[in-house]
Structure formats: structure tokens, C-alpha cells
Image: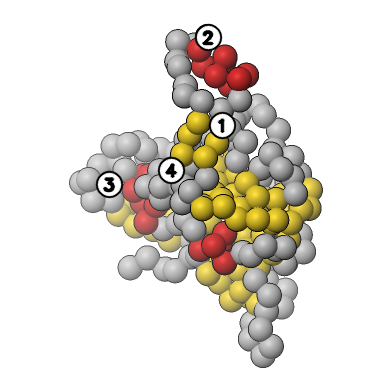
Amino acid sequence: MPVANQRFELNPGDDVVGVVQVVHTTKEDTLADVARRFNIGYEEIVRANPKVDAWLPGEGTEVIVPSQFVLPDAPRAGLVINIPSMRIFYFPPAKKGEKQVVFTHPIGIGKMGWRTPEGVTKITRRQKDPTWHVPVSVRKEHHENGEDLGGMCMLGTFSQYSTISENSAIKVDPDLPLDKVVLIGCGVPTTNPATRKATISTTFRIVEIN
């Protein structure tokens, strides 16, 4: 049975959470299926299994599940996005007499070659059923490649906007391996608990810690 790896209780001095797991695939499995089952990003599981075919691993193939995570070297409060590890961490306020906890999920980070802004910001508002107006520059780039995009896209069930106005955290279809799918301008949790628990004024840190 999968070991829970979304929520962890922290002891003083903890810098690593979770455990590495090993599973065997079924006939129908892909590595993306295994990753989704264990709350792991596509890139994470592919790097951990370089000799396994990502889309046709075969029945009974041993797969390493890298479900052990190094916590980012940043204040443990609010939301923290670590760009190199392509993960989001949420540290809710600790309740008196209880251990601090952290929630973590894999994310997708924009388009390759475009720098994700780093810094400290705050969630300023939430929006239900958000839309995104595709910039003219993006439509032009795709048109030159023989692809035509509409002027507006549905993003998901909700988004959260920060004081870095060009970026928002959104929930989209959890069946998509979002660290493989390229998205423009967003850090996107593949599952929703971390961002749904965050509220307006929650601190949001975007860091680059290898």
C-alpha cells in the first residue's frame, strides 16, 4: 500500500520528510500513473527510473518512487515554491500543543527558458472559474508554428492571485502530469489541498534552492 506522502508532521530539526518506496507496475501502468498515485511529479519519477520506459514499463517492472523530500531552506510559514525541485510546500500556522505540519505537491513551472520570478509575496484574492487571456506574443509564436490559439482559456476551478500580478496558483485536472505539460506563466499544483488551505494574506515564497 502507498505510504502517505502529502502531509507530514515535523519534529525540531527535520529537513527531510517521507521515505523512498519501491512498487511493481501492472500491465496498464505508465510511470505517469504511478507518479499520480503517489503524489509525485513526472520529472521526479523519470529521473528516479532512467532505465524504465516511461510509457510502456511492462507488467511487474520494479519502479522506485522518490517520495522523500528535502524541505526548502526557507522560513517555514505559508506557501513555498522551490523551482529546481518543482514542488510546492505549505506550512500552515502551528496550533498550540501540536507539531508543525507541511503539505507538499508536485508543480509545473511555466515555459522552458522563461525565468520564473523569485521573491516573497502574499495571496491577495481568490477567483472561482478563472480565465486567461492569451497574450498577443504567445498567439503570434504559435501561429508561426502552424498552431492557432483562441484568445481565452479556461484554467480550472479556482485561482489565487499574489502581489506579483502576473502569477497565480491554480488547480487544474489532476489527471495531467503537469510538470511535463508546459504552462505559460503559472506555477501549478497538480492537486489542490495545499493551495485550498491557503487563505488571503498567506505568505507566498518563490525560491530557487538546489
N-term-proximal mark, 3 vs 1? 3
Task: State the residue position of label 2.
Answer: 144
Which secondary structure, mark 3?
A: loop
Task: State the residue position of label 4.
Answer: 177
Task: State the residue position of label 1.
Answer: 133
Q: Amino acid at mark 2?
A: Glu
CB atoms at circles 3 and 2 under 8 Å apart?
A: no
Q: Amino acid at mark 1?
A: His
N-term-proximal mark, 2 vs 1? 1
Task: Nearest to the eye among marks 3 and 2: give it.
Answer: 2
Q: Amino acid at mark 3?
A: Asp
Task: Nearest to the eye among marks 3 and 1: give it.
Answer: 1
Task: State the residue position of label 3.
Answer: 29
User: How far separated are the C-alphas under marks 2 and 1?
Assistant: 19 Å
CB atoms at circles 3 and 1 under 8 Å apart?
A: no
Task: Nearest to the eye among marks 4 and 1: give it.
Answer: 1
Residue sitting at 47 percent across and 22 percent down? 149
Tell me residue 203's x, y (percent): 73, 61
| Relative vertical location of residue 169 with respect to residue 1 in this rendering, above or below | above
Q: Quadrant of the N terminus?
A: bottom left
Q: Amino acid at mark 4?
A: Pro
CB atoms at circles 4 and 3 under 8 Å apart?
A: no
Which secondary structure, mark 1?
A: strand
184 vs 3, left or right, is right
Which secondary structure, mark 4?
A: loop
N-term-proximal mark, 4 vs 2? 2
**Label 2 CA crowd tier, 10 Å (few <14, some 14–19, many 20+):** few
